[in-house]
C-alpha cells in the first residue's frame, strides 16, 4: 500500500485536491482511502494562504520512481510551476508527497521513503491518522507519533513560571 500526502494553498484548494486524487486513482492505482481535508498554517515559510491537507492510501504495483514521475506530472498539470528545493518553500496549487510505501525503505537523490518529515509534521500525521492510525512508522503507530507531537507542542507552548 502506498500512502501519499497532499496539500494546496492557492487557487481552488479543495478542487485542486480532488483533481489530484482523481488523477492519482487513474494513473497510480486504486484509491483505497482518503482522509478528511484539514486547513493548516503554512510550515517552513510565510504566506497569507492557508493550506488544505489530506492523505490517501493507494493500492499499486508500480515502482516508486515511476510513481514519483507520475505525481510530478500531476502537479504540473494542475498548475504547479516550481518544486521546493533546498528547504525553500513557496505557495503552491498542489503538492503530492510520497509518504510511505509499505515494506519499502528507499534513499536515492530523488526520493527518500519513508518521507523524512513524516513523523514531525502534524499536517501530515493528522490526515494519515484518519486512514491508517495503526500503521507502523519508525517503530511507532501513526496515532502514537501524532499524540507525541501534540504533547510536545503543548509542552513547548506552556508559559514558564
Image (tube, rainbow, N blue to C red):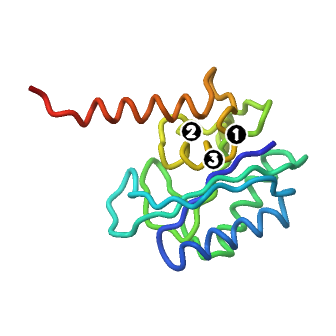
Find numbered disc 3 in the image and state the secondary structure of the residue it sits on: helix
* Crowdedness near tag 2: few (<14), some (14–19) or many (≥20) residues, C-alpha within 10 Å: many
Answer yes or no: do the residues labelled 2 and 1 have beta carbons within 8 Å? yes
Residue 33 position within the rendered picture, expressed as x and y whole percent measured from the top left: 75, 53
Q: Which mark is residue 158?
A: none
The answer to whether residue 158 is left or right of residue 41 is left
Q: Point out the tag, 2 or 1, that comes first from the N-terminus.
A: 1
Q: Point out the tag, 1 or 3, that comes first from the N-terminus.
A: 1
The answer to whether residue 12 is left or right of residue 102 is left
Answer yes or no: do the residues labelled 2 and 3 have beta carbons within 8 Å? no
Work out which residue is located at the far top of the displayed protein and give it.
139
* Figure disc tally: 3
Find numbered disc 2 in the image and state the secondary structure of the residue it sits on: helix
Which residue matches tag 2? 118
Q: CA distance from mark 2 to mark 3?
A: 15 Å
Q: Say which residue appears at 69% left-offset and 68% top-offset.
A: 20
Which residue matches tag 1? 100
Q: Say which residue appears at 32% left-offset and 60% top-offset.
A: 46
Q: Which mark is residue 130?
A: 3
Q: Say which residue appears at 61% left-offset and 39% top-offset.
A: 115
Amino acid at each position: 500500500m502506498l500512502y501519499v500526502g497532499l496539500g494546496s494553498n492557492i487557487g481552488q484548494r479543495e478542487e485542486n485536491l480532488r483533481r489530484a486524487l482523481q488523477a492519482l486513482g487513474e494513473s497510480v492505482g486504486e484509491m483505497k482511502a482518503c482522509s478528511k481535508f484539514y486547513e493548516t498554517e503554512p510550515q517552513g515559510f510565510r504566506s497569507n494562504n492557508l493550506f488544505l491537507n489530506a492523505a490517501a492510501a493507494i493500492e499499486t504495483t508500480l515502482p516508486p520512481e515511476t510513481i514519483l514521475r507520475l505525481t510530478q506530472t500531476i502537479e504540473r498539470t494542475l498548475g504547479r510551476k516550481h518544486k521546493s528545493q533546498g528547504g525553500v518553500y513557496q505557495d503552491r496549487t498542489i503538492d503530492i508527497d510520497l509518504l510511505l510505501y509499505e515494506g519499502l525503505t528507499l534513499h536515492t537523490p530523488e526520493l527518500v521513503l519513508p518521507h523524512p518529515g513524516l513523523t514531525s509534521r502534524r499536517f501530515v500525521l493528522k490526515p494519515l491518522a484518519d486512514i491508517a492510525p495503526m500503521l507502523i512508522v519508525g517503530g511507532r503507530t501513526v496515532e502514537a507519533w501524532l499524540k507525541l507531537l501534540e504533547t510536545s507542542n503543548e509542552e513547548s507552548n506552556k508559559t514558564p513560571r
